[in-house]
C-alpha cells in the first residue's frame, strides 16, 4: 500500500516572544507498506518505509518556546529516509518484533486524543524528546533499533524498545550511525486499553552524559545517566469527547527540563452535520531543571520555574483529500525567561492526502 501526505503550515507569531512575524513550513511524506506474507509467503511478516522531505522556516525562533509551536518543524530542511523497518508477528499474533530505523514517539507515551494539536509537547513528552546526546529517536531523525510488543489480553500490552542513542538517517550529514558509540536508549511501557487507556513507562540511556552544572575536583563535569518515567491517562467523557492527561519526569541533570505535563480534550465530531469536524484543547507545562536555571542566572538571565503553553485547534475535512486546521496558541514565559513577553501564535495547517 502506498500513501502520500503533504502538510503546509502558515504560522504567525503575532505578539510577544523573541520577535513577531509570519513563517511557513511544510512536510511531504511518502509511505509504503508491504505484506510479506502475500508478496513472498513470509508468514506474519511486514515491511514499512517513510521518505520525508521538509522545507520552509522555523517559527519557533520567533516564539522562543522551549516546547516548540509546530510539530513538523525541523532543525535542517532536506530529503531523508525517515523510517524503514520490518516486523515479524508470532505467538498467535499476540506478539511482534520490529527491527530497523524506528520512531519511538509513535508508540511510547502516546495519547491519541492529543494527536490533533500542533504543539510538539502533545506528542512525545518534551523531557524525553530532548534527552540523550542528540535527542530521542523521533521525527524527523530516527535511529536503528528494535521494538517488541506482547499483548497478553485484548486490553493489555507490554512493550519495550532499544534504539541507538545517536540519531541519524540516510539523507542527513553522517547518515545512519552503526557504531552505537554513544550507547542506547532503552524504553519500556505497560498499558491497559479497555474503556480508555492507562499506561506507565520508563526510559534510560546505557551511557552517562556530562552534568550540565556539577563538576568534580578537577573541574570536569560529573557524568550522569539520563533517565526518566512517564504516564498516560485517556478517558472518554461523552460519546464525542475524550480527555487526556500525560506527564513525565527526568533526572534534570543533563537537560533543561525536569518535569512536564499535558492535559486536554478532543471533541469529534464537533458538529453532527460534519462527521470529520474536530475541536482540540490542550495545556502543556514544562518545569525547568534547577541546574539549568542556575546556569542561566550565571549568564545574567532571570528564568522562571516553568513555561506554559495553551492551544486551541479546530480541524475539518473540506474534501476527501483536503483538511484545514486553524490553530491558536498562547505561551506564558517563553523559554522561562521573565524578560520575554508572553507570546501569541496563530497558525493554519492544510493537509492533502493521496
Image (cartoon, helix red, strand yellow):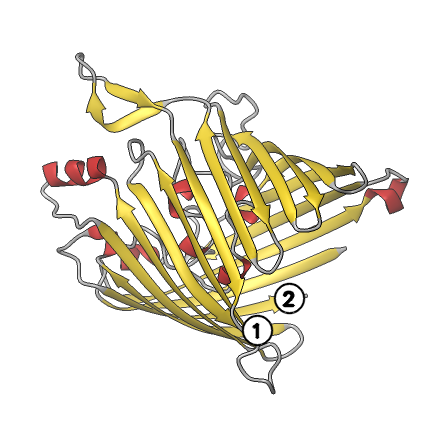
* Residue under pointer 1: 323
Identity of the residue drawn at 90% across and 40% down: 41
The percent position of residue 143, horizontal first and vertical second, equals 55, 35
**Mark 1 falls on what kind of element?**
strand
Identity of the residue drawn at 42% across and 34% down: 134
Dot 2 alpha-carbon crowd within 10 angstroms: few under 14, some 14 to 19, many 20 or more: some
- Which of the two discs, 1 and 2, labels the residue nearer the N terminus? 1
Height in image: 165 above or below 290?
A: above
Residue extending farthest bottom: 273
The percent position of residue 119, horizontal first and vertical second, equals 41, 59
Residue extending farthest top: 218
Return the residue nearer the eye: 244 or 82. 244
Q: How many numbered discs, if any?
A: 2
**Cα separation between marks 1 and 2:** 9 Å
Q: Are marks 1 and 2 in contact (CB under 8 Å)?
A: yes
Residue 140: tell me if it is visible: no
Q: Which mark, by number, is residue 149?
A: none
The percent position of residue 310, horizontal first and vertical second, equals 33, 65
* Residue 96 falls in image quadrant: top right
Instruction: Report whether 297 appears left or right of 286.
Output: left
* Residue under pointer 2: 353
Height in image: 173 above or below 79?
A: above
Return the residue nearer the eye: 312 or 201. 201
Image quadrant holding the N terminus, namely bottom right
The percent position of residue 279, horizontal first and vertical second, equals 48, 74
Amino acid at each position: 500500500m502506498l500513501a502520500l501526505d503533504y502538510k503546509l503550515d502558515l504560522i504567525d507569531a503575532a505578539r510577544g516572544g523573541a520577535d513577531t512575524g509570519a513563517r511557513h513550513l511544510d512536510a511531504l511524506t511518502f509511505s509504503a507498506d508491504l505484506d510479506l506474507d502475500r508478496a513472498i509467503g513470509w508468514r506474519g511478516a511486514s515491511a514499512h518505509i517513510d521518505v520525508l522531505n521538509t522545507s520552509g522556516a522555523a517559527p519557533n525562533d520567533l516564539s522562543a518556546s522551549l516546547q516548540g509551536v509546530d510539530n513538523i518543524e525541523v532543525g535542517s530542511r532536506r530529503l531523508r529516509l525517515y523510517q524503514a523497518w520490518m516486523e515479524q508477528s508470532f505467538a498467535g499474533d499476540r506478539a511482534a518484533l520490529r527491527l530497523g530505523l524506528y520512531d519511538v514517539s509513535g508508540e511510547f507515551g502516546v495519547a491519541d486524543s492529543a494527536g490533533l494539536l500542533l504543539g510538539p509537547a502533545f506528542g512525545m513528552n518534551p523531557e524525553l524528546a530532548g534527552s540523550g546526546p542528540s535527542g530521542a529517536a523521533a521525527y524527523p531523525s530516527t535511529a536503528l533499533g528494535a521494538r517488541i510488543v506482547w499483548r497478553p489480553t485484548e486490553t493489555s500490552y507490554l512493550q519495550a524498545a532499544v534504539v541507538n542513542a545517536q540519531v541519524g538517517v540516510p539523507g542527513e550529514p553522517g547518515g545512519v550511525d552503526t557504531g552505537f558509540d554513544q550507547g542506547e536508549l532503552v524504553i519500556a511501557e505497560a498499558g491497559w486499553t479497555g474503556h480508555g487507556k492507562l499506561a506507565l513507562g520508563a526510559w534510560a540511556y546505557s551511557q552517562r552524559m556530562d552534568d550540565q552544572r556539577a563538576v568534580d575536583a578537577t573541574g570536569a563535569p560529573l557524568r550522569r545517566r539520563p533517565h526518566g518515567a512517564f504516564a498516560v491517562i485517556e478517558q472518554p467523557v461523552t460519546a464525542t469527547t475524550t480527555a487526556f492527561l500525560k506527564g513525565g519526569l527526568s533526572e534534570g541533570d543533563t537537560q533543561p527540563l525536569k518535569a512536564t505535563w499535558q492535559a486536554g480534550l478532543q471533541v469529534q465530531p464537533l458538529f453532527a452535520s460534519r462527521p470529520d469536524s474536530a475541536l482540540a484543547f490542550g495545556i502543556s507545562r514544562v518545569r525547568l531543571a534547577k541546574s539549568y536555571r542556575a546556569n542561566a542566572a550565571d549568564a545574567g538571565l532571570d528564568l522562571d520555574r516553568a513555561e506554559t503553553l495553551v492551544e486551541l485547534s479546530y480541524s475539518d475535512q473540506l474534501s476527501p483529500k483536503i483538511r484545514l486546521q486553524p490553530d491558536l496558541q498562547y505561551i506564558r514565559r517563553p523559554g522561562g525567561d521573565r524578560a520575554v513577553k508572553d507570546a501569541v501564535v496563530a497558525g493554519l495547517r492544510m493537509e492533502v492526502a493521496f
